[in-house]
C-alpha cells in the first residue's frame, strides 16, 4: 500500500497569486456577494409578505417530502383475499 502525506503550502508574503488562483479568489468573492444579496432580498420579501412565505415554505416542504420519502412499499404476505 502506498502512503500519502499532505503538504501545506503557504504563500510567500508579497508574492502575486497565479492567474488561476486570482480568478478563483474573484469567483469566491462574487459568490459571497451574490449569496448576501439573495439573503437580503429574501429577508425583505419575507417581511413584506409573511403569509406568502408561509405558503411557499409549506409547498416546498411538501414537494421535498414527496421526493425524499417516495412510495410506501407493500408488505409481502399481508394481503388476504
Image: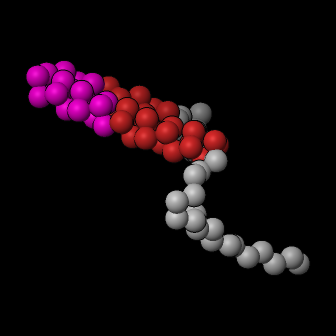
Foreground residue, 80 or 16?
A: 16
Q: Position of residue 46 (x, y in %)?
A: 17, 28
Q: What's the magenta bit mostly, secondary-structure-wise?
A: helix
Q: Position of residue 27 (x, y in %)?
A: 51, 37
Residue 25 can be seen, yes or no: yes
Foreground residue, 27 or 42?
A: 27
Task: Tell me: 58 left or right of 10.
Answer: left
Foreground residue, 36 or 11?
A: 11
Task: Tell me: 34 left or right of 6.
Answer: left
The residue positioned 56% from the left and 43% from the top of the image is 22
The residue positioned 57% from the left and 65% from the top of the image is 12
- Residue 67 in the magenta stretch? The answer is no
Q: Position of residue 69 (x, y in %)?
A: 49, 40
Segment colored magenta: 36-58
The residue positioned 36% from the left and 36% from the top of the image is 33
The residue positioned 52% from the left and 64% from the top of the image is 13
In the rendered view, tell whether residue 15 sits above or below residue 1: above
Task: Tell me: 64 left or right of 27.
Answer: left
In the rendered view, tell whether residue 14 sits above or below residue 63: below
Q: How many discs appear?
A: 0
Residue 51 can be seen, yes or no: no
- Residue 37 in the magenta stretch? The answer is yes
Q: Which quadrant of the rendered structure holds the N terminus?
A: bottom right
Specify the quadrant of the image occupied by residue 35. top left
Q: Residue furthest right?
A: 1
Specify the quadrant of the image occupied by residue 29. top left
In the rendered view, tell whether residue 21 sits above or below residue 34: below
Q: Residue furthest front?
A: 14
Q: Which quadrant of the rendered structure holds the C terminus?
A: top right
Amino acid at each position: 500500500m502506498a502512503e500519502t502525506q499532505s503538504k501545506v503550502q503557504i504563500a510567500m508574503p508579497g508574492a502575486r497569486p497565479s492567474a488561476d488562483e486570482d480568478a478563483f479568489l474573484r469567483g469566491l468573492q462574487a459568490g459571497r456577494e451574490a449569496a448576501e444579496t439573495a439573503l437580503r432580498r429574501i429577508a425583505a420579501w419575507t417581511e413584506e409578505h409573511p403569509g406568502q412565505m408561509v405558503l411557499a415554505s409549506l409547498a416546498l416542504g411538501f414537494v421535498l417530502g414527496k421526493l425524499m420519502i417516495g412510495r410506501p412499499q407493500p408488505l409481502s404476505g399481508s394481503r388476504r383475499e
